[in-house]
Image (tube, grey):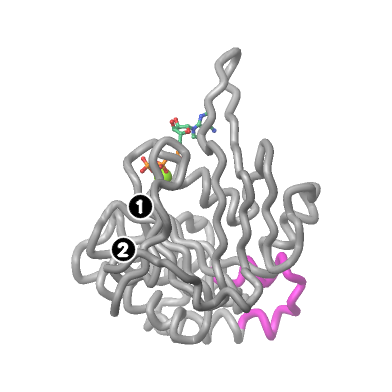
Amino acid sequence: MTVMTSDPLASAAPVIELTGARKTYHTGDIEFEALRGIDCRIFPGEYVAIVGPSGSGKSTLMNILGCLDVLTSGRYVLAGEDVSTLDEDALASARNRRIGFVFQQFNLLSSLSALGNVELPLIYAGVAPAERRARALAALERVGLGDRSRNHPGQLSGGQQQRVAIARALVTEPAIVLADEPTGNLDSHSTRDVLAMLDDLHAEGRTIVLITHEGDVAARASTVYNVTDGQFVGAGTEIAK
Ligand SMILES: Nc1ncnc2c1ncn2[C@@H]1O[C@H](COP(=O)(O)OP(=O)(O)OP(=O)(O)O)[C@@H](O)[C@H]1O
Ligand SMILES: [Mg+2]
């Protein structure tokens, strides 16, 4: 591993740019600063891992990057658009256009089939039914689950459910894939499958941001950021390949 001293991608515009990012949660009278001034630039096609102890703010950061939540102060520019000040609807639109999510708990809707789950982001995007179905099926085939499209999540293994979630993340062709502990609930075999799929998405030119506790998982990334108490510790570390 070598510490990054110069930025080889500095001439390209960052796809993610956080400046002085702070997030304060309020629970009754109690305030908690989960993010305490994070500055970060992520460039198109980068594979970034974010590591840090439990409670350090990783998921908070992921929710911000994914436009699921907004900063208390500071600025977030996503693909050239300042999303810090967007209202709920505009934020949802930015999220739907640019980002695919993969979560530790899969977050599939149990009442829908695999196909129905993968179609969901296309419904939000206003894609017509026939095209929606075809694209969702192609995404399921891509993750090796073309023959399971009618199964509901409860009828699939954990590894299969995560593959459905990956199909749902890639069906909109997002520029950015955010994955929060995507292998946290998987056995070693499914972990390998899921990481290989993320590698493929990266090889296609997508930007990947992966949150993980596991060092060997983080080693897949090209840059690793360490979060402690809501702050990045040290510079991003570039992984020598
Ligand atoms: N909605 C919320 N309201 C109040 N406090 C919150 C909220 N969400 C998170 N926190 C607090 O913010 C801190 C950071 O939480 P976060 O979920 O980002 O941690 P994490 O790094 O993802 O941890 P883990 O590795 O356990 O998933 C924690 O102390 C947590 O208790
Ligand atoms: Mg978390």
| Residue at the image position 43 percent from the left and 65 percent from the top | 48
**Residue 134 location in percent, x, y?**
60, 86
Q: Quadrant of the N terminus?
A: bottom left
**Residue 127 location in percent, x, y?**
74, 77
Q: Is residue 192 above or below residue 108?
A: below
Outermost residue toward the left in this view: 188
Q: Nearer the viewer, residue 156 or 82?
A: 82
Q: Earlier in the sequence, mark 2 or mark 1?
A: 1
* Three-letter code, disc 1: Val
Q: Which residues are magenta?
A: 118-133
Estimate how packed mark 1 is, as few (under 14), some (14 to 19) or many (20 or more) residues with alpha carbons within 10 Å. many
Instruction: Write down the residue under mark 2.
Output: 218
- Ligand 2: which quarter? top left
Q: Is residue 31 visible?
A: yes
Q: Nearer the viewer, residue 41 or 208?
A: 41
Assess whether mark 1 and mark 2 are in contact (beta carbons under 8 angstroms).
Answer: yes
| Residue at the image position 55 percent from the left and 16 percent from the top | 30
Q: Is residue 176 left or right of residue 211?
A: right
Q: Is residue 117 above or below residue 172?
A: above
SS at mark 1 in the image: strand
Q: Quadrant of the C terminus?
A: bottom left
| Residue at the image position 57 percent from the left and 77 percent from the top | 171
Taking the magenta stretch, the answer to whether it contains residue 119 is: yes
Taking the magenta stretch, the answer to whether it contains residue 155 is: no
Instruction: Write down the residue under mark 1.
Output: 51
Magenta stretch prevailing secondary structure? helix
**Residue 186 location in percent, x, y?**
26, 60
* Three-letter code, disc 2: Ala
**Residue 25 location in percent, x, y?**
58, 29
SS at mark 2 in the image: helix
Q: Is residue 236 above or below residue 168?
A: above
Q: Is residue 71 left or right of residue 224?
A: right
